[in-house]
Image (spheres, coloured by chain):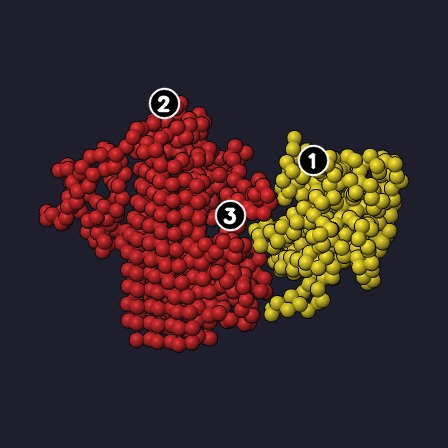
């Protein structure tokens, strides 16, 4: 047992490093001798603690004491209750200004408290060195009239017209978007603490009606950061976002602990978590059930990649649960700054279309390098295609042009992306439907390395057809093995595939193949 | 002033030959319709297009008429929006096919590049058509052509484009600026900004060209040499582009609107002294319509 985060009023604990989202066995817990509810998750959080107070936490497996930790909560300067600033929390009155006033008035080391209640608000802007705590039963209900939302300009030219100041981002480009429910611009040392709810209320508005059409500006996210550092989100639930849920950009040292992200399976572009050109990220013990990719790691499109070339890197995703959604963990397709060093371990995925999904295309640029991506100890159930790499992704406004989709070798130039090493180790996937994996590289720049080690795949007996990769000419398939086109090196060690129809390995235009 | 405009619109109404009507006249009527909502501008465009569509529609094989095509292409898309009559789309598609730089799977052009004149007259329509009905395959080519034109013809020391080889420095100084600025701003308006790299290239080029104009500004913030130039059509084009740049937020309103507004006011005053032909009137209506749309938006 290990404490992974402490604030003045909460902590997050790693209970079982060997489990996935769920611990291998439930534990009985005692906090300063007082019994807590039985815990069956590997990572959990305690709320309602007192500042600057010592605690002892004991974990019991059955009747046997397994482990014990002690910790002291942080000090706290003061608490500003939003109700004292005039917030009603009645679901009717607009509480934007009282809550914003409380945030802006909070001193360093202070805490803004949102008690139980329904707070109807527009976008709120964060401030450095504070905590914002949502008590149980507290719910921010985002207004749905877009005319009441501030717009964040995508790009503003500097006064001398030589440079630019970027504020907003939409699908990898600096485009105007409505401010998000919680927006942080250039802030640091902020803690957002649950267990309350941030509700985008999209089903009762018109955000999801004709979602691809820009109406005034692009749709808001629920949580958006630009140029921030040292930010922690703990125990909050994000629900019914107009578009992506959590979208930090150009930020570092970010922790997301025991968060829940929920959106209907049919909701448009409701990705769970989209870090874009960020570094040093921890995503622990979080549960996703969304309408698009659960996690999509990004680094902009070619303009951003070529001008700033800031990769998204050093990311640890662990003890998380990904339900439904198009991809469990996705890289791209906006990845022009590069994506490096991603560790996904001890996670559980169920019912996703794809487990690991790499998406890129010609035109992302020379800094668009995806490398060092590891899936380790991941359990999948009913994931239709556990591994998909697609270098000809077509879901861009110009993604179906001949230039993007040609299977003929193109000149390698400043627009050519690179896919490096992708590794699957100790992956157990049952109930697959379409295929074990589908790898489509570029003829002029094949995927460098696919490595599968100690993996088991088995198929659902009634598995349905599905198109594994969104590229022209890729047909729906069912119960296929590992399919690869344009890959330099494929290595399989101790890999089993049960229930495959036809050949387990279908490789064309691939280089070195090892199967042990 | 009003008389010459009424005469120009009436001439459009009575014309069933597309060679007889400059594309800018169609653009001017459309701009005025969008700015004022006055039906007679729309009626003039639609009746003219219907008359040539139903009687004599075929693309002239003589490329000497290419300068008409862009204006007609955009007018056909306007007519499609206003009527839903798919024949307008078909006709617009014919123009698109004639000019679209065809790209083979190897990305090598089969058809020769759009030449410098075609960029000015055709880019906005090709982009608009491709944005609505195509794969946006033409964006890259259009961006390349503008980039080439900028590199080859923009003279930073003069703050002007100089495309016409025969033109001497100072002579008709704004004529190429007018063509290029109009082409750039209309193309930018037609582009899907989500293909940002191409959009941004053109936006930066537009800004550079506008900054170049700043060299010709007097102390009162008026582009005096343009006001006093005999080339009214070039002046009107530049003013149209400036007003549209502000409206589309490509130019800083605080900085550029006073320049555009003051220069426009001074130029209109000068213009009242002169008699306008249909050509000039079309561009004047474009500028006038654009200014009105900007004013409306700022309200």
- Please provide percent x and percent y for residue A207: 50, 41
Q: Residue at x 77, y 52 (%)?
A: B176
The red chain is: A
Residue under numbered circle 1: B258
CB atoms of marks 2 and 1 within 8 Å: no
| Quadrant occupied by the C terminus of chain A | bottom left
CB atoms of marks 3 and 2 within 8 Å: no
Among the 4 quarters of the image, the one containing residue B277: top right
In whole angstroms, how far apart are the C-alphas of marks 3 and 1?
Answer: 32 Å
According to the rendering, which colour does chain B have? yellow
The tag on residue A170 is: 3
The tag on residue A84 is: 2
Badge 3 local density, few (<14 within 10 Å), some, or many (20+)? some
Residue situated furthest right in the rendering: B275
- Please provide percent x and percent y for residue A142: 44, 35
In whole angstroms, how far apart are the C-alphas of marks 2 and 1?
Answer: 47 Å
The chain identifier of the residue carrying mark 3 reads A
- Please provide percent x and percent y for residue A121: 44, 31
- Please provide percent x and percent y for residue A437: 39, 66
Between disc 3 and disc 2, whose residue precedes? 2
Please name which of the two marks, 2 or 1, marks the residue nearer to the observer.
Answer: 1
The chain identifier of the residue carrying mark 1 reads B
Disc 2 with disc 1 on a shared chain: no
**Residue A173 visible:** yes
Q: Residue at x 83, y 52 (%)?
A: B18
């Amino acid at each position: 047992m290990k404490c992974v985060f402490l604030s003045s009023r909460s902590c997050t604990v790693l209970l079982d490093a060997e489990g996935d989202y769920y611990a291998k066995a439930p534990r009985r817990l005692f906090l300063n001798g007082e019994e807590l509810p039985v815990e069956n998750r590997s990572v959990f959080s305690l709320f309602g603690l007192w500042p600057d107070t010592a605690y002892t936490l004991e974990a019991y497996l059955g009747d046997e004491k397994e482990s014990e930790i002690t910790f002291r909560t942080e000090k706290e300067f003061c608490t500003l209750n939003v109700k004292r600033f005039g917030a009603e929390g009645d679901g009717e009155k607009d509480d934007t200004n009282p809550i914003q006033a409380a945030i802006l008035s909070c001193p360093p080391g202070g805490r803004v408290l949102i008690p139980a209640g329904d707070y109807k608000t527009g976008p709120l802007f964060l401030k450095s060195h504070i905590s914002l705590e949502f008590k149980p039963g507290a719910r921010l209900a985002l207004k749905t009239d877009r005319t009441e939302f501030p717009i964040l300009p995508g790009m503003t030219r500097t006064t001398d017209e030589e440079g630019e100041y970027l504020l907003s981002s939409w699908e990898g480009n600096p485009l105007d978007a409505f401010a998000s429910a919680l927006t942080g611009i250039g802030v640091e040392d902020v803690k957002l603490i649950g267990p309350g709810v941030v509700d985008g209320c999209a089903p009762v508005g018109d955000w999801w009606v004709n979602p691809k059409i820009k109406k005034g500006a692009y749709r808001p996210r629920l949580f958006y950061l630009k140029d921030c550092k040292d930010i922690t989100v703990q125990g909050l639930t994000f629900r019914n976002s107009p578009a992506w849920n959590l979208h930090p950009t150009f930020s570092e040292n970010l922790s997301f602990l025991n968060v829940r992200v929920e959106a209907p399976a049919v909701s448009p572009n409701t990705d769970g978590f989209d870090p874009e050109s960020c570094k040093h990220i921890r995503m622990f013990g979080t549960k996703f059930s969304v309408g698009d990719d659960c996690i999509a790691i990004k680094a902009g499109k070619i303009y951003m990649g070529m001008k700033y070339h800031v990769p998204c890197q050093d990311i640890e995703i662990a003890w998380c649960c990904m339900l439904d959604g198009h991809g469990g963990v996705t890289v791209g397709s906006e990845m022009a700054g590069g994506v490096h060093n991603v560790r996904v371990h001890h996670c559980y995925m169920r019912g996703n279309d794809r487990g690991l999904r790499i998406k890129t295309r010609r035109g992302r640029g020379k800094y668009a390098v995806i490398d060092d991506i590891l899936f380790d100890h991941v359990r999948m159930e009913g994931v239709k295609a556990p591994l998909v790499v697609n270098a000809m992704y077509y879901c861009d406004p110009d993604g179906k042009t001949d230039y993007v989709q040609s299977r003929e070798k193109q000149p390698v130039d400043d627009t050519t992306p690179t896919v490096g090493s992708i590794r699957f180790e100790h992956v157990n996937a049952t109930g697959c439907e379409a295929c074990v994996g589908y790898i489509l590289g570029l003829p002029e720049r094949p995927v460098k390395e696919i490595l599968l080690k100690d993996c088991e795949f088995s198929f659902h007996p009634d598995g349905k057809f599905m198109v594994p990769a969104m590229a022209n000419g890729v047909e729906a398939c069912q119960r296929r093995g590992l399919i690869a086109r344009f890959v330099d090196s494929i290595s399989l060690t101790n890999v089993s595939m049960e229930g495959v129809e036809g050949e387990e390995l279908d490789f064309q235009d691939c280089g070195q193949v090892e199967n042990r | 002033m009003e008389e010459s405009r009424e005469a120009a619109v009436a001439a459009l109404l009575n014309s069933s030959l597309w060679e007889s009507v400059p594309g800018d006249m169609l653009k001017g009527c459309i701009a005025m319709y969008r700015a004022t909502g006055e039906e007679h501008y729309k009626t003039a465009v639609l009746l003219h297009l219907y008359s040539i569509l139903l009687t004599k529609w075929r693309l002239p094989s003589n490329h000497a008429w290419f300068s008409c095509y862009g204006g007609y292409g955009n007018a056909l898309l306007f007519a499609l929006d206003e009527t839903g009559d798919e024949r307008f789309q078909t006709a617009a598609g014919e123009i698109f096919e004639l000019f679209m730089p065809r790209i083979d799977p190897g990305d090598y052009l089969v058809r020769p590049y759009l030449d410098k004149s075609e960029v000015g007259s055709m880019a906005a329509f090709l982009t608009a058509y491709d944005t609505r009905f195509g794969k946006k395959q033409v964006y890259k080519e259009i961006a390349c052509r503008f980039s080439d034109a900028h590199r080859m013809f923009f003279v930073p020391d003069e703050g002007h484009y100089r495309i016409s080889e025969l033109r001497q420095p100072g002579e008709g100084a704004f004529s190429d600026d007018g063509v290029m600025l109009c082409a750039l701003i209309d193309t930018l308006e037609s582009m899907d900004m989500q293909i940002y790299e191409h959009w941004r290239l053109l936006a930066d080029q537009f800004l550079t060209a506008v900054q170049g104009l700043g060299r010709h500004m007097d102390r009162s913030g008026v582009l005096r040499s343009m006001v006093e130039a005999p080339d009214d059509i070039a002046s009107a084009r530049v003013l149209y582009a400036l007003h549209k740049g502000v409206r589309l937020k490509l130019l800083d309103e605080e900085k550029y609107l006073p320049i555009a507004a003051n220069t426009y006011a001074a130029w209109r005053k000068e213009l009242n002294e002169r008699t306008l032909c249909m050509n000039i009137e079309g561009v004047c209506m474009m500028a006038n319509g654009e200014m009105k749309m900007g004013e409306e938006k700022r309200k």
